[in-house]
Image (cartoon, rainbow, N blue to C red):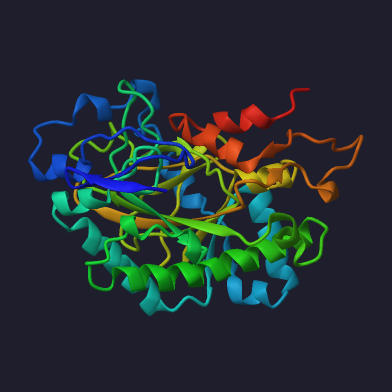
Amino acid sequence: MDLKVENGCIKEDNGLGWGKSLPVQSVQEIVTNGYQSVPERYIQEIKDRPSSISSESLQASLQIPIIDFSLLAKGDEHETRKLDLACKEWGFFQIRNHGVQVKILQTMKAAMAAFFELPLMEKKKYAMGANDLEGYGQAYVVSKEQKLDWCDLVALKTLPLEQRNLNFWPLNLPGFKEAVEEYSIEVQKVAEEINANLSILMGMERDGLKRYQGELKQLMRMNYYPPCSSPDLVFGVSPHSDGGSLTVLLQDDDVIGLQIKHKGEWIPVKPIPNALVVNISDAIEIMSNGVYKSIEHRAITNEKKARISAAAFAHVDDELEIGPLDSMVDDPHRPPMYKKIKYIDYIRQVLARKMDGKDHTDLVKIQT
């Protein structure tokens, strides 16, 4: 893949990748320049605005499941049942005692903050390529008319090592590469252990999913949500589900931003210091034949404080054909509910559309 630099921005000469996103102005730049009101393209339609969330009493009574990862890794039956229930009913859970050192988490957060504190022209050196979604910018921008999210991001292919494109990495930023490398390796171990437990729950040996999927790859999306003067009008990230296998999220410990849709209500995910948030993504929903749910979620903003997060997307090889696993199909009681599709074809369909709930999973559902 050939790359060239134009106007301080990296551009890709050829190669399709997973898709592309149209370039738009940095939200951080809008805020820094002292905007008078939220630009029209960021103001959501009235019916879509995040102001209509669950009642305070419901929010207080509900929180996503919390799993002790250290017990799960030892085969504890109680924690395994909790994982099974969390994946069936919630699609999200938080994990404690996950083995990733607090120092590694803190260093990762500091590295993200340092990147987004760089001058705009410096960040633009790592702008997304013309035909790819790796680099600095915004994702899912597919038209000049759509509503935009109040968020800047940098997305990097982190694992396996040979798939990294260091043209998109700010190598001159002290400690950034080392922090992301160390965190990505540790969080991948977490994803692999959860995958092994899901294999057992889906009626296979511990290495069942690994043998089917191969080694999981990883894309890291680092998000920056600037404060917004009218947080009830905008989304940090629009409602969507993730297209990969599993997502492991490092949240901001001090600011609530993530919300998930549970039984028709939007429930905030309250940060637990040094915990990680895990969610089932579309590929696992498809492979589990709908038993495990890839849940719609979104991010909101606030007036006073910026928020950062890092989502590590564990995904299968582009050429793998995904579909319901034999162990999850039981004709006539539970026939296949999803078509088989090559992963690259599925993810391109996902990324070619504006984020809009779970519309993209309908593309592979078998209509009955």
The residue furthest right is 332
Q: Position of residue 357 (x, y in %)?
A: 50, 32
Q: Is residue 287 above or below residue 167?
A: above
* Res 36 quadrant in image: top left
Q: Nearer the viewer, residue 151 or 144?
A: 144
From the top left corner, tell me how far across and down residue 57 is, in percent: 45, 45
In the displayed structure, would residue 353 be above or below residue 28?
above
Count every numbered label the image shows and give the total. 0
Against 176, residue 13 (above or below) is above
Query: Is residue 293 visible in this depiction of the protein?
Result: no
Q: Residue furthest front?
A: 2
* Quarter holding residue 70: bottom right
| Front residue of this view, candidates 261 and 150 | 150
At x 61%, y 33%, the residue is: 361
Q: Position of residue 164 (x, y in %)?
A: 43, 60
- The answer to whether residue 15 is seen in the rendering is yes
Residue at 22% x, 24% y is 40
77 left or right, relative to 249: right
Locate the C terminus by quadrant. top right
Residue sitting at 91 percent across and 37 percent down?
331
In percent of width and height, residue 91 lies at 60, 49
The answer to whether residue 163 is left or right of residue 91 is left
